[in-house]
Image (cartoon, rainbow, N blue to C red):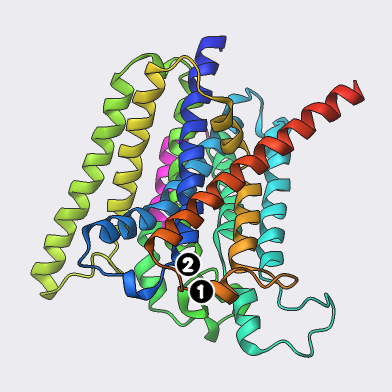
């Protein structure tokens, strides 16, 4: 791959990652702090914020799948000897471990005598870190199947994503706690309090793998604007499919659950994510470089996620801002706090990067 194509690829990926992580930070901050008095669905501004907040997780998950698969397929080696496989396995264990650590029910580490059933329920619930970890694991399994059966990544990844999307509604109707322990049931539906069960959310990670594989196989793709148009067209297709599906749902049942439990919402969100990728890929065509901070933000999404979530929601060893400011601030104070959180996370990444550079200089 040429240096110029690598440069374009990094610009595109890091812009998406930076946008996704900053959107996540402001979304969590506003959700924790904004008073219920200002959560008016009649307000077009608040409505737009709610819509974009609903897009944050699909965008974040899709981008995670894109990046991992891009790096995996960029290495032209068999699955067994690909160094990215080992890194992926380590990443899986790290993400799942951190996911449970953030929800650990007791500060005493081994004394669980005072842990309530509600605290156990919170500990067992599946969140973004667990989900991305398993999403990466599923991507590696799909990549292995694709390689060993000599099938196209696009077919295997697409079918895998559709399985997770398609099983969402029937799986949500099953009380999984009747058939398995609570900590496993949380991976299958929201009944145990999980925010991001595997169905449908892992589908977004795997869908991102389709794009990641394509980027790795076509190193010069960003030099042609047709790629941006192709992404926009694919996004428009899924949005149209979701709208058509909603009309069918209305005709059959006389009501629409589009914004709640309808599988059409999954397709709609995927379409929006693809259009956002189209916009970013178009911007990347016009840029020869981007400020270093965007690259650093994109490469430190895990660190930012863990730190800002701990500040806001706390953990077993720290109560978090939610204990004193939960939904108590007005609009301007909330916006100020969201900006402060974004600035703090940005400064944290800059400082850590400078320490890394100095450490390398000293080590050298």
Circles 2 and 1 in contact, beta carbons < 8 Å: yes
Image x and y of residue 82, in percent: 69, 31
Residue sitting at x 35%, y 69%:
169
- 64 in the magenta segment: no
Q: Give the alpha-carbon distance from disc 2 to disc 1, as whole Å.
A: 5 Å
**Local SS, label 2:** helix
Quadrant showing the N terminus: top right
**Local SS, label 1:** loop
Quadrant showing the C terminus: top right
Residue sitting at x 72%, y 73%:
316
Where 102 falls versus 205 (above or below)? Answer: below
Disc marking residue 33: 2
Q: First in sequence: mark 2 or mark 1?
A: 2
Where 18 falls versus 228 (above or below)? Answer: below
Magenta span covers which residues? 150-164
Where 149 falls versus 165 (above or below)? Answer: above
């Amino acid at each position: 791959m040429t240096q110029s194509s690598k440069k374009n690829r990094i610009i595109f990926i890091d812009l998406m990652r930076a946008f996704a992580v900053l959107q996540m930070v402001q979304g969590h901050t506003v959700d924790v702090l904004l008073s219920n008095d200002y959560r008016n669905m009649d307000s077009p501004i608040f409505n737009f914020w709610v819509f974009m907040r609903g897009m944050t997780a699909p965008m974040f998950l899709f981008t995670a799948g894109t990046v991992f698969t891009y790096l995996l397929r960029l290495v032209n080696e068999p699955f067994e000897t690909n160094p990215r496989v080992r890194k992926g396995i380590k990443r899986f264990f790290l993400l799942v471990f951190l996911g449970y650590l953030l929800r650990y029910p007791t500060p005493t580490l081994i004394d669980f005598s005072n842990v309530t059933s509600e605290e156990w329920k919170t500990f067992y619930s599946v969140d973004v870190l667990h989900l991305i970890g398993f999403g990466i694991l599923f991507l590696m399994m799909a990549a292995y199947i694709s390689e060993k059966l000599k099938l196209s990544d696009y077919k295997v990844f697409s079918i895998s994503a559709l399985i997770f999307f398609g099983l969402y509604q029937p799986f949500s109707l099953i009380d999984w706690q009747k058939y398995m322990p609570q900590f496993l049931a949380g991976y299958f539906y929201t009944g145990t309090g999980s925010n991001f069960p595997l169905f449908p959310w892992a589908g977004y990670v795997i869908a991102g793998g389709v794009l990641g594989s394509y980027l790795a196989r076509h190193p010069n793709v960003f030099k042609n604007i047709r790629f941006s148009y192709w992404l926009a067209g694919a996004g428009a297709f899924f949005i149209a499919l979701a709208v058509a599906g909603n009309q069918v749902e209305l005709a059959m049942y006389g009501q629409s659950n589009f914004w709640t439990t309808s599988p059409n919402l999954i397709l709609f969100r995927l379409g929006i994510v693809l259009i956002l990728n189209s916009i970013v890929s178009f911007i990347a065509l016009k840029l020869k470089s981007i400020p270093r901070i965007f690259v650093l933000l994109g490469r430190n999404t895990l660190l930012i996620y863990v730190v800002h979530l701990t500040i806001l929601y706390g953990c077993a060893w720290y109560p978090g801002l939610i204990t004193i400011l939960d939904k108590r601030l007005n609009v301007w104070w909330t916006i100020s706090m969201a900006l402060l959180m974004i600035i703090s996370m940005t400064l944290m990444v800059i400082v850590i990067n400078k320490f890394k550079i100095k450490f390398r200089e000293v080590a050298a």
